[in-house]
Image (cartoon, rainbow, N blue to C red):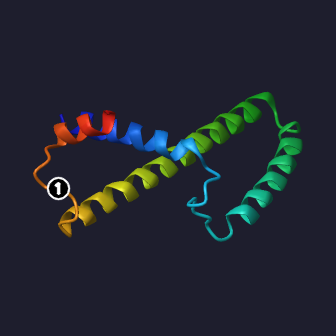
Amino acid sequence: MQNEIWEQVGQFLNRLRCENVTRDTAVEVPGYRENQDEMEVLREKCELMIHQLSKEQRQLLLEWMAKLEDMNSLEGQRAYCQGYVDCILMLSGMGLLRQDLSPEDFMKWIRQ
Protein backbone atom coordinates (compact mmCIF):
# COMPACT_ATOMS: atom_id res chain seq x y z
CA MET A 1 0.00 0.00 0.00
CA GLN A 2 2.82 2.40 0.87
CA ASN A 3 4.49 1.98 -2.55
CA GLU A 4 1.18 2.66 -4.31
CA ILE A 5 0.81 5.89 -2.35
CA TRP A 6 4.32 7.07 -3.14
CA GLU A 7 3.87 6.03 -6.76
CA GLN A 8 0.81 8.30 -6.97
CA VAL A 9 2.66 11.12 -5.19
CA GLY A 10 5.58 10.64 -7.60
CA GLN A 11 3.29 10.82 -10.62
CA PHE A 12 1.68 13.99 -9.28
CA LEU A 13 5.04 15.63 -8.59
CA ASN A 14 6.35 14.63 -12.02
CA ARG A 15 3.34 16.27 -13.68
CA LEU A 16 3.97 19.38 -11.61
CA ARG A 17 7.66 19.39 -12.51
CA CYS A 18 6.99 19.02 -16.23
CA GLU A 19 4.21 21.59 -16.53
CA ASN A 20 6.26 24.75 -16.89
CA VAL A 21 10.04 24.63 -16.80
CA THR A 22 10.37 28.32 -17.73
CA ARG A 23 8.44 29.64 -14.76
CA ASP A 24 9.98 32.33 -12.55
CA THR A 25 10.44 29.89 -9.68
CA ALA A 26 12.44 27.37 -11.72
CA VAL A 27 15.80 26.59 -10.11
CA GLU A 28 18.91 27.44 -12.11
CA VAL A 29 21.87 25.34 -11.00
CA PRO A 30 25.22 27.15 -11.40
CA GLY A 31 27.27 25.64 -14.20
CA TYR A 32 24.34 23.73 -15.72
CA ARG A 33 24.15 25.65 -19.02
CA GLU A 34 27.92 25.59 -19.48
CA ASN A 35 28.00 21.85 -18.84
CA GLN A 36 25.12 21.37 -21.26
CA ASP A 37 27.04 23.25 -23.98
CA GLU A 38 30.18 21.19 -23.31
CA MET A 39 28.14 17.98 -23.52
CA GLU A 40 26.78 18.99 -26.92
CA VAL A 41 30.31 19.60 -28.27
CA LEU A 42 31.44 16.22 -26.90
CA ARG A 43 28.37 14.51 -28.34
CA GLU A 44 29.21 15.83 -31.81
CA LYS A 45 32.83 14.62 -31.51
CA CYS A 46 31.67 11.21 -30.27
CA GLU A 47 29.23 10.84 -33.14
CA LEU A 48 32.11 11.33 -35.58
CA MET A 49 34.24 8.81 -33.68
CA ILE A 50 31.44 6.23 -33.46
CA HIS A 51 31.49 5.76 -37.23
CA GLN A 52 35.08 4.52 -36.99
CA LEU A 53 34.10 1.66 -34.68
CA SER A 54 33.05 -1.81 -35.71
CA LYS A 55 29.32 -2.49 -35.88
CA GLU A 56 29.45 -4.49 -32.64
CA GLN A 57 31.43 -1.81 -30.79
CA ARG A 58 29.15 0.93 -32.12
CA GLN A 59 26.03 -0.96 -31.02
CA LEU A 60 27.43 -1.52 -27.52
CA LEU A 61 28.43 2.13 -27.13
CA LEU A 62 25.06 3.41 -28.37
CA GLU A 63 23.24 1.04 -26.02
CA TRP A 64 25.36 2.25 -23.09
CA MET A 65 24.71 5.90 -24.00
CA ALA A 66 20.94 5.30 -24.15
CA LYS A 67 20.99 3.59 -20.75
CA LEU A 68 23.09 6.42 -19.34
CA GLU A 69 20.53 8.98 -20.52
CA ASP A 70 17.70 6.91 -19.03
CA MET A 71 19.56 6.64 -15.72
CA ASN A 72 20.28 10.37 -15.61
CA SER A 73 16.61 11.11 -16.16
CA LEU A 74 15.54 8.70 -13.43
CA GLU A 75 18.12 10.10 -11.01
CA GLY A 76 16.85 13.62 -11.67
CA GLN A 77 13.26 12.56 -11.13
CA ARG A 78 14.21 10.72 -7.95
CA ALA A 79 16.08 13.74 -6.56
CA TYR A 80 13.18 16.04 -7.44
CA CYS A 81 10.60 13.84 -5.73
CA GLN A 82 12.88 13.27 -2.74
CA GLY A 83 13.13 17.04 -2.30
CA TYR A 84 9.36 17.29 -2.17
CA VAL A 85 9.08 14.44 0.30
CA ASP A 86 11.76 16.04 2.49
CA CYS A 87 9.87 19.36 2.39
CA ILE A 88 6.62 17.65 3.32
CA LEU A 89 8.30 15.83 6.20
CA MET A 90 9.99 19.02 7.40
CA LEU A 91 6.75 21.04 7.30
CA SER A 92 4.91 18.23 9.01
CA GLY A 93 7.59 18.00 11.70
CA MET A 94 7.27 21.74 12.27
CA GLY A 95 3.52 21.31 12.74
CA LEU A 96 2.73 23.39 9.67
CA LEU A 97 0.89 20.55 7.91
CA ARG A 98 -2.03 18.58 9.19
CA GLN A 99 -0.83 15.44 10.86
CA ASP A 100 -4.27 13.88 11.22
CA LEU A 101 -4.56 13.32 7.46
CA SER A 102 -3.98 9.69 6.50
CA PRO A 103 -1.91 8.87 3.40
CA GLU A 104 -5.09 7.65 1.69
CA ASP A 105 -6.90 10.92 2.44
CA PHE A 106 -3.85 12.84 1.28
CA MET A 107 -3.93 11.01 -2.05
CA LYS A 108 -7.66 11.73 -2.46
CA TRP A 109 -6.95 15.39 -1.76
CA ILE A 110 -4.17 15.49 -4.38
CA ARG A 111 -6.40 13.93 -7.04
CA GLN A 112 -9.06 16.61 -6.68
Q: Residue farthest to the front?
A: 112
Q: Residue at x 21, y 59 (%)?
A: 97
Residue 68: quadrant of the picture = top right
- Give amino acid for label 1: Arg
Q: Residue at x 89, y 43 (%)?
A: 48
Q: Is residue 31 left or right of residue 112?
A: right
Q: Quadrant for the C terminus, please.
A: top left
For the residue pair 78 and 66, the one nearer the viewer reads as 78
Q: Is residue 56 left or right of residue 104?
A: right
Q: Residue at x 13, y 44 (%)?
A: 102
Identify the residue under disc 1: 98
Q: Is residue 35 left or right of residue 64?
A: right
For the residue pair 68 and 73, the one nearer the viewer reads as 73
Q: Residue at x 81, y 32 (%)?
A: 54
Name the element at disc 1: loop
Q: Examine the rendered structure and indicate whether residue 101 appears above or below residue 28.
A: above
Query: Where residue 15 appears, x then y in whole percent?
Result: 48, 39
Query: Where residue 22 appears, x then y in whole percent?
Result: 65, 52
